[in-house]
Image: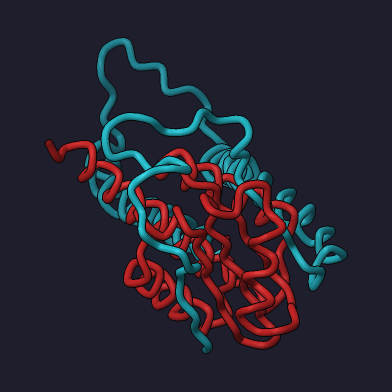
Amino acid sequence: MGPVPAGDLTAAQRAEVQRLLEHAERQSGLTFSAYVGPWEGGRPGVEAMLERLANPDRSVLVAVDPAGRQLEIVTGRLARVPLDDRACGLAALSMTSAFTTGDIMGGLRDGLSVLGEQARRMRVEWVDQP
Amino acid sequence: MRSLLASVAAATVLAVTSLALAGPVAASERGVVYDGDDPGPGYTPLEALALFVGIPALSLIIIAVAVYAPGWVKGRSSSTDVALAGEPVWLSSPSGAMAAPSGPGMITPGGPTDHEERGGASARW
């Protein structure tokens, strides 16, 4: 799928995001959610959204405001263990690289891939530890 | 469209090259009659044009339509999704449908964590 204007997600692109979320969940065992649109209250507003999820401690929420050019990645208390802030920063960097060109879909694709992969890596390392 | 033009250009170059190479050979054989030869009346220019240009061109068009038609149809259906644009989108992975991970080192609600706060990252562009 090619670049889309800020804020525009077609039904097909939503379906792709849904697939990416499911893939990230399968990789990591964490619950992934994505919100694309405006929100109020800055980062606390996104943390409040996370609180409304079924299992906020095990959840990862990626919120993108294309109009406000703002990205927030919030991890729950337990999700923060396999997906630390550095990994989230890496994902945010890859996402904003795409967002600057107006490619919202590409940014979501890159970010969710990075998050799922980073969480999976930590999960595997723990299993391998004696 | 660019690849279609490239395909047409490649086909044209191939046809011209083939004719250029075949021409001298055909000329050298002209007038030679072998035993059992029955060359027939030959083609009129119109028949030859239809046979060697029309049919290949028609085949090319049919193949091009077969290749590009799905993309055109898909593109048209995507454009109808514009009505959805701009609305807030909220999507979640189906965590309820999967079993929680288990095993050594797996995070569980009572698992190995000393984090009390939310984590993550913020960015603007």
Q: Quadrant of residue A52?
A: bottom right
* Residue pictured at 61% horizontal, 55% vertical: A33
Q: Nearer the viewer, residue B85 or B26?
A: B85
Q: Nearer the viewer, residue B52 or B112?
A: B112
Q: Relative to B95, is A83 above or below? A: below
Residue B125 visible in the snapshot: yes
Furthest toward the left, the residue is A130
* Residue pictured at 74% horizontal, 54% vertical: A11
Q: Position of residue A10 (x, y in %)?
A: 73, 60
Q: Position of residue A38 (x, y in %)?
A: 74, 78
Q: Relative to A13, is A95 above or below? A: below
Horizontally, residue B63 falls left or right of residue A129, namely: right
Q: Relative to B46, is A100 above or below? A: below
* Residue pictured at 31% horizontal, 55% vertical: B17
Furthest toward the top, the residue is B36
Horizontally, residue B12 falls left or right of residue B55, namely: left
Among the chains, which one is cyan? B
Residue B46 visible in the snapshot: no
Q: Position of residue A29 (x, y in %)?
A: 45, 41
Quadrant position of the N terminus of chain B in the picture: bottom right
Q: Colour of chain A?
A: red
Furthest toward the right, the residue is B83
Q: Position of residue A55 (x, y in %)?
A: 61, 48
Q: Nearer the viewer, residue A84 or B115?
A: B115
Label count reads 0
Q: How is the image coloured?
A: by chain
* Residue pictured at 55% horizontal, 35% vertical: B43
